[in-house]
Image: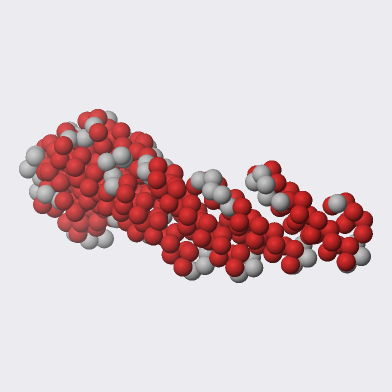
Amino acid sequence: MGSSEFLRARGLTALLEGAPAEAERMILAIPEGDRDCIARMVLAIARLRQGREAGEPDEGLEDPAAAALRIETVSPPDLPRTIAEAFGSGVPDDLIPLVIDSAEHRAAGLLEAGDYAGFLRIYEVIDREHGDADRLSWGISAAIEQVEMEDDFADLAAAIEGLDDRLREDVRSAVERQYLSTIERERFDRAARYLDHFPWLDRERLIGSILEAGRNAETYGIPRDAISHYRMAVEIGDDPSLAGDLAGRVLGLARRAITAGEHDEALRILEEARYFADPDVQREHQDIARGFVREGRYEDAVRLYESMHDRYPGSKTAYHLKDIANRLRTEGRIDEAIALY
Protein backbone atom coordinates (compact mmCIF):
# COMPACT_ATOMS: atom_id res chain seq x y z
CA MET A 1 0.00 0.00 0.00
CA GLY A 2 2.97 2.29 0.46
CA SER A 3 6.03 3.02 2.50
CA SER A 4 5.94 2.84 6.29
CA GLU A 5 6.55 6.58 6.56
CA PHE A 6 3.68 7.33 4.17
CA LEU A 7 1.29 4.98 6.01
CA ARG A 8 2.25 6.45 9.37
CA ALA A 9 1.57 9.96 8.06
CA ARG A 10 -1.79 8.83 6.66
CA GLY A 11 -2.69 7.18 9.96
CA LEU A 12 -1.75 10.27 11.95
CA THR A 13 -3.78 12.49 9.61
CA ALA A 14 -6.81 10.21 9.88
CA LEU A 15 -6.63 10.27 13.66
CA LEU A 16 -6.38 14.06 13.73
CA GLU A 17 -9.39 14.24 11.41
CA GLY A 18 -11.52 12.15 13.77
CA ALA A 19 -11.34 8.86 11.83
CA PRO A 20 -9.76 6.37 14.29
CA ALA A 21 -10.84 3.28 12.33
CA GLU A 22 -9.06 4.56 9.21
CA ALA A 23 -6.03 5.46 11.33
CA GLU A 24 -5.90 1.92 12.69
CA ARG A 25 -6.16 0.47 9.18
CA MET A 26 -3.24 2.60 7.96
CA ILE A 27 -0.96 1.65 10.86
CA LEU A 28 -1.81 -2.07 10.65
CA ALA A 29 -0.71 -1.95 7.02
CA ILE A 30 2.81 -1.19 8.26
CA PRO A 31 4.81 -4.34 8.98
CA GLU A 32 4.95 -4.74 12.76
CA GLY A 33 8.72 -4.60 12.82
CA ASP A 34 8.68 -1.27 10.98
CA ARG A 35 6.28 0.53 13.33
CA ASP A 36 8.13 3.26 15.18
CA CYS A 37 6.97 4.74 18.48
CA ILE A 38 4.73 7.30 16.78
CA ALA A 39 3.03 4.66 14.65
CA ARG A 40 2.45 2.45 17.71
CA MET A 41 1.05 5.38 19.64
CA VAL A 42 -1.31 6.30 16.79
CA LEU A 43 -2.53 2.71 16.74
CA ALA A 44 -3.04 2.62 20.51
CA ILE A 45 -4.96 5.90 20.53
CA ALA A 46 -7.06 4.86 17.54
CA ARG A 47 -8.11 1.71 19.38
CA LEU A 48 -8.86 3.61 22.59
CA ARG A 49 -11.06 6.05 20.72
CA GLN A 50 -13.01 3.15 19.27
CA GLY A 51 -13.75 1.94 22.78
CA ARG A 52 -11.27 -0.91 22.74
CA GLU A 53 -8.10 -1.75 24.64
CA ALA A 54 -5.02 0.03 23.37
CA GLY A 55 -3.48 -3.27 22.37
CA GLU A 56 0.06 -1.97 22.73
CA PRO A 57 1.01 -0.75 26.23
CA ASP A 58 3.39 2.07 27.09
CA GLU A 59 6.25 -0.41 27.28
CA GLY A 60 8.67 0.03 24.46
CA LEU A 61 7.43 3.50 23.56
CA GLU A 62 9.94 6.30 23.78
CA ASP A 63 9.22 8.78 26.57
CA PRO A 64 7.55 11.46 24.40
CA ALA A 65 5.19 8.95 22.80
CA ALA A 66 4.41 7.27 26.12
CA ALA A 67 3.66 10.63 27.75
CA ALA A 68 1.35 11.58 24.89
CA LEU A 69 -0.47 8.25 25.08
CA ARG A 70 -1.07 8.69 28.81
CA ILE A 71 -3.16 11.79 28.05
CA GLU A 72 -5.77 9.40 26.65
CA THR A 73 -6.01 7.28 29.79
CA VAL A 74 -5.35 9.31 32.95
CA SER A 75 -8.16 10.50 35.22
CA PRO A 76 -9.43 14.09 34.69
CA PRO A 77 -7.66 15.59 37.75
CA ASP A 78 -4.32 14.36 36.36
CA LEU A 79 -4.82 15.76 32.86
CA PRO A 80 -3.15 19.20 33.26
CA ARG A 81 0.00 17.63 34.73
CA THR A 82 0.08 14.83 32.16
CA ILE A 83 -0.34 17.22 29.24
CA ALA A 84 2.42 19.46 30.58
CA GLU A 85 4.69 16.41 30.96
CA ALA A 86 3.97 15.37 27.38
CA PHE A 87 5.04 18.78 26.10
CA GLY A 88 8.09 18.79 28.35
CA SER A 89 9.34 15.35 27.37
CA GLY A 90 11.09 16.40 24.19
CA VAL A 91 8.17 15.85 21.86
CA PRO A 92 9.29 15.94 18.20
CA ASP A 93 7.55 18.47 15.99
CA ASP A 94 5.58 15.86 14.07
CA LEU A 95 4.13 14.54 17.34
CA ILE A 96 2.96 17.86 18.76
CA PRO A 97 -0.31 17.92 16.74
CA LEU A 98 -1.24 14.53 18.21
CA VAL A 99 -0.44 15.66 21.75
CA ILE A 100 -2.72 18.65 21.23
CA ASP A 101 -5.37 16.47 19.59
CA SER A 102 -5.33 14.03 22.52
CA ALA A 103 -5.60 16.91 24.97
CA GLU A 104 -8.52 18.40 23.06
CA HIS A 105 -10.17 14.99 22.79
CA ARG A 106 -10.17 14.71 26.58
CA ALA A 107 -11.22 18.33 26.94
CA ALA A 108 -14.28 17.68 24.77
CA GLY A 109 -15.37 14.94 27.16
CA LEU A 110 -15.02 17.28 30.13
CA LEU A 111 -17.02 19.97 28.37
CA GLU A 112 -19.79 17.52 27.56
CA ALA A 113 -19.88 16.53 31.24
CA GLY A 114 -20.13 20.18 32.29
CA ASP A 115 -16.68 20.23 33.93
CA TYR A 116 -15.86 23.76 32.81
CA ALA A 117 -12.91 24.20 35.16
CA GLY A 118 -11.25 21.00 33.93
CA PHE A 119 -11.98 21.89 30.31
CA LEU A 120 -10.49 25.37 30.62
CA ARG A 121 -7.41 24.18 32.49
CA ILE A 122 -6.51 21.90 29.58
CA TYR A 123 -6.51 24.85 27.19
CA GLU A 124 -4.55 26.93 29.68
CA VAL A 125 -1.85 24.23 29.72
CA ILE A 126 -1.77 24.06 25.91
CA ASP A 127 -1.29 27.83 25.80
CA ARG A 128 1.36 27.85 28.52
CA GLU A 129 3.37 24.92 27.17
CA HIS A 130 2.88 25.48 23.45
CA GLY A 131 2.18 29.24 23.24
CA ASP A 132 -1.20 28.74 21.59
CA ALA A 133 -3.30 31.70 22.76
CA ASP A 134 -5.69 31.34 19.83
CA ARG A 135 -6.54 27.80 20.87
CA LEU A 136 -7.12 28.97 24.44
CA SER A 137 -9.41 31.71 23.16
CA TRP A 138 -11.33 29.14 21.12
CA GLY A 139 -11.65 26.89 24.16
CA ILE A 140 -13.05 29.69 26.27
CA SER A 141 -15.55 30.57 23.53
CA ALA A 142 -16.62 26.93 23.25
CA ALA A 143 -17.25 26.79 26.99
CA ILE A 144 -19.36 29.94 26.92
CA GLU A 145 -21.29 28.67 23.91
CA GLN A 146 -22.19 25.48 25.77
CA VAL A 147 -23.11 27.48 28.86
CA GLU A 148 -25.63 29.45 26.81
CA MET A 149 -26.99 26.33 25.14
CA GLU A 150 -27.34 24.31 28.36
CA ASP A 151 -28.14 27.26 30.64
CA ASP A 152 -25.19 26.30 32.84
CA PHE A 153 -24.34 29.84 33.93
CA ALA A 154 -24.08 28.88 37.60
CA ASP A 155 -21.61 26.08 36.84
CA LEU A 156 -19.37 28.36 34.78
CA ALA A 157 -19.50 31.08 37.44
CA ALA A 158 -18.37 28.56 40.06
CA ALA A 159 -15.65 27.22 37.75
CA ILE A 160 -14.24 30.69 37.08
CA GLU A 161 -13.64 31.32 40.77
CA GLY A 162 -11.51 28.19 41.02
CA LEU A 163 -9.16 29.08 38.15
CA ASP A 164 -5.68 30.57 38.35
CA ASP A 165 -5.57 34.37 38.26
CA ARG A 166 -4.50 34.73 34.63
CA LEU A 167 -6.95 32.18 33.27
CA ARG A 168 -9.74 33.60 35.43
CA GLU A 169 -9.18 37.05 33.97
CA ASP A 170 -9.09 35.65 30.42
CA VAL A 171 -12.39 33.87 30.97
CA ARG A 172 -14.00 36.88 32.62
CA SER A 173 -12.98 39.04 29.66
CA ALA A 174 -14.48 36.51 27.25
CA VAL A 175 -17.70 36.38 29.27
CA GLU A 176 -17.91 40.16 29.12
CA ARG A 177 -17.40 40.16 25.34
CA GLN A 178 -20.12 37.56 24.89
CA TYR A 179 -22.44 39.49 27.22
CA LEU A 180 -21.97 42.67 25.19
CA SER A 181 -22.46 40.73 21.96
CA THR A 182 -25.69 39.30 23.35
CA ILE A 183 -26.90 42.82 24.12
CA GLU A 184 -25.89 43.98 20.64
CA ARG A 185 -28.06 41.22 19.15
CA GLU A 186 -30.93 42.33 21.42
CA ARG A 187 -31.11 38.98 23.16
CA PHE A 188 -31.97 40.77 26.36
CA ASP A 189 -33.43 37.80 28.26
CA ARG A 190 -30.20 35.91 27.70
CA ALA A 191 -28.10 38.92 28.72
CA ALA A 192 -30.11 39.14 31.94
CA ARG A 193 -29.11 35.53 32.69
CA TYR A 194 -25.48 36.63 32.50
CA LEU A 195 -26.18 39.34 35.08
CA ASP A 196 -27.81 36.81 37.42
CA HIS A 197 -24.52 34.92 37.72
CA PHE A 198 -21.81 37.44 36.84
CA PRO A 199 -22.64 40.55 38.92
CA TRP A 200 -19.43 42.28 37.84
CA LEU A 201 -20.86 42.84 34.35
CA ASP A 202 -22.12 46.29 33.34
CA ARG A 203 -25.81 46.29 34.32
CA GLU A 204 -26.41 49.84 33.11
CA ARG A 205 -25.23 48.90 29.61
CA LEU A 206 -28.00 46.32 29.36
CA ILE A 207 -30.67 48.61 30.80
CA GLY A 208 -29.72 51.41 28.41
CA SER A 209 -29.93 49.08 25.41
CA ILE A 210 -33.31 47.75 26.51
CA LEU A 211 -34.69 51.27 26.91
CA GLU A 212 -33.38 52.20 23.48
CA ALA A 213 -35.12 49.16 22.00
CA GLY A 214 -38.32 50.24 23.75
CA ARG A 215 -38.10 53.74 22.31
CA ASN A 216 -37.48 52.29 18.86
CA ALA A 217 -40.59 50.14 19.22
CA GLU A 218 -42.54 53.29 20.09
CA THR A 219 -41.21 55.01 16.98
CA TYR A 220 -42.26 52.09 14.79
CA GLY A 221 -45.73 51.95 16.34
CA ILE A 222 -45.32 48.68 18.23
CA PRO A 223 -46.54 49.59 21.74
CA ARG A 224 -46.63 46.02 23.04
CA ASP A 225 -42.93 45.56 22.32
CA ALA A 226 -42.16 48.95 23.83
CA ILE A 227 -43.97 48.12 27.07
CA SER A 228 -42.36 44.68 27.22
CA HIS A 229 -38.92 46.28 27.00
CA TYR A 230 -39.78 48.91 29.61
CA ARG A 231 -40.96 46.24 32.03
CA MET A 232 -37.74 44.31 31.53
CA ALA A 233 -35.68 47.43 32.20
CA VAL A 234 -37.49 47.99 35.49
CA GLU A 235 -37.07 44.35 36.53
CA ILE A 236 -33.33 44.39 35.82
CA GLY A 237 -32.63 47.87 37.13
CA ASP A 238 -32.28 49.00 40.72
CA ASP A 239 -33.35 52.63 40.28
CA PRO A 240 -36.73 53.23 42.00
CA SER A 241 -37.38 56.33 39.89
CA LEU A 242 -37.18 54.41 36.60
CA ALA A 243 -40.65 52.90 36.93
CA GLY A 244 -42.21 56.31 37.49
CA ASP A 245 -40.40 57.79 34.50
CA LEU A 246 -41.51 54.95 32.26
CA ALA A 247 -45.11 55.18 33.46
CA GLY A 248 -45.26 58.56 31.72
CA ARG A 249 -44.06 57.03 28.45
CA VAL A 250 -46.62 54.24 28.69
CA LEU A 251 -49.41 56.77 29.30
CA GLY A 252 -48.22 58.56 26.19
CA LEU A 253 -48.71 55.33 24.25
CA ALA A 254 -52.24 55.04 25.61
CA ARG A 255 -53.07 58.60 24.58
CA ARG A 256 -51.81 57.95 21.06
CA ALA A 257 -54.04 54.89 20.83
CA ILE A 258 -57.04 56.94 22.01
CA THR A 259 -56.31 59.61 19.41
CA ALA A 260 -56.12 56.90 16.74
CA GLY A 261 -59.48 55.49 17.83
CA GLU A 262 -57.86 52.26 19.05
CA HIS A 263 -59.83 52.17 22.26
CA ASP A 264 -59.34 48.51 23.17
CA GLU A 265 -55.60 48.89 22.70
CA ALA A 266 -55.62 52.05 24.81
CA LEU A 267 -57.48 50.26 27.59
CA ARG A 268 -54.96 47.42 27.54
CA ILE A 269 -52.05 49.87 27.69
CA LEU A 270 -53.59 51.67 30.67
CA GLU A 271 -53.74 48.36 32.52
CA GLU A 272 -50.07 47.81 31.67
CA ALA A 273 -49.25 51.26 33.04
CA ARG A 274 -50.28 50.10 36.52
CA TYR A 275 -47.17 47.90 36.60
CA PHE A 276 -44.97 51.00 36.54
CA ALA A 277 -47.06 53.21 38.81
CA ASP A 278 -50.70 53.81 39.71
CA PRO A 279 -51.32 57.08 37.90
CA ASP A 280 -54.60 58.96 37.82
CA VAL A 281 -55.88 58.04 34.37
CA GLN A 282 -59.51 59.05 34.90
CA ARG A 283 -59.38 61.40 31.91
CA GLU A 284 -58.03 58.66 29.65
CA HIS A 285 -60.70 56.22 30.81
CA GLN A 286 -63.40 58.82 30.16
CA ASP A 287 -62.06 59.40 26.65
CA ILE A 288 -62.11 55.67 25.94
CA ALA A 289 -65.66 55.32 27.30
CA ARG A 290 -66.82 58.21 25.10
CA GLY A 291 -65.14 56.48 22.17
CA PHE A 292 -67.10 53.31 22.90
CA VAL A 293 -70.33 55.33 22.99
CA ARG A 294 -69.55 56.96 19.64
CA GLU A 295 -68.94 53.52 18.17
CA GLY A 296 -72.24 52.22 19.56
CA ARG A 297 -70.45 49.87 21.92
CA TYR A 298 -72.76 50.70 24.79
CA GLU A 299 -72.10 47.56 26.84
CA ASP A 300 -68.37 48.21 26.79
CA ALA A 301 -68.97 51.84 27.74
CA VAL A 302 -71.25 50.83 30.62
CA ARG A 303 -68.69 48.36 31.99
CA LEU A 304 -65.97 50.98 31.85
CA TYR A 305 -68.08 53.68 33.51
CA GLU A 306 -69.06 51.28 36.27
CA SER A 307 -65.42 50.35 36.92
CA MET A 308 -64.59 54.06 37.03
CA HIS A 309 -67.25 54.56 39.68
CA ASP A 310 -65.34 52.22 42.01
CA ARG A 311 -61.93 53.59 41.13
CA TYR A 312 -62.69 57.33 40.92
CA PRO A 313 -65.22 58.58 43.46
CA GLY A 314 -67.18 61.50 42.05
CA SER A 315 -66.70 60.41 38.44
CA LYS A 316 -70.35 61.20 37.58
CA THR A 317 -71.05 57.63 36.56
CA ALA A 318 -74.80 58.07 36.96
CA TYR A 319 -74.78 61.01 34.52
CA HIS A 320 -72.92 59.01 31.87
CA LEU A 321 -75.13 55.94 32.28
CA LYS A 322 -78.22 58.11 31.90
CA ASP A 323 -76.78 59.51 28.66
CA ILE A 324 -76.30 55.98 27.34
CA ALA A 325 -79.84 55.07 28.43
CA ASN A 326 -81.23 58.02 26.46
CA ARG A 327 -79.33 56.88 23.37
CA LEU A 328 -80.69 53.35 23.76
CA ARG A 329 -84.24 54.68 24.13
CA THR A 330 -83.82 56.78 20.99
CA GLU A 331 -82.75 53.62 19.15
CA GLY A 332 -85.84 51.77 20.41
CA ARG A 333 -83.92 49.54 22.80
CA ILE A 334 -86.30 50.30 25.66
CA ASP A 335 -85.56 47.31 27.92
CA GLU A 336 -81.82 48.02 27.83
CA ALA A 337 -82.46 51.70 28.53
CA ILE A 338 -84.71 50.95 31.51
CA ALA A 339 -82.00 48.72 33.03
CA LEU A 340 -79.67 51.70 33.19
CA TYR A 341 -82.05 54.14 34.87
| Image location (x, y in percent) of residue 152 | 39, 40
Q: Position of residue 181 (x, y in %)?
A: 32, 56
In the image, 109 versus 226, the foreground residue is 226
Q: Does residue 268 appear left or right of residue 81 in this picture?
A: right
Establish if 50 lies above or below 6: above
Specify the quadrant of the image occupied by residue 284.
Answer: bottom right
Quadrant in the picture for residue 185: bottom left
x%, y% of residue 122? 22, 40
Instruction: Please state which of residues 46 and 206 is positioned toward the viewer in this rendering.
Output: 206
Would residue 96 be found to the left or right of residue 105 on screen? left
Judged left or right of residue 34, residue 247 is right
Q: Is residue 191 left or right of residue 175?
A: right
Considering every residue shown, the one lying at the far left of the view is 90
Residue 49 in view (yes/no)? no
Q: Relative to 104, is 225 above or below? A: below
Quick one: quadrant of the N terminus? bottom left
Q: Residue at x 53, y 57 (%)?
A: 251
Q: Is residue 158 visible?
A: yes
Q: Quadrant of residue 290?
A: bottom right
Vertical side of 54 occupied by 325: above or below: below
- Give the image location of residue 236, x and y in percent: 40, 44
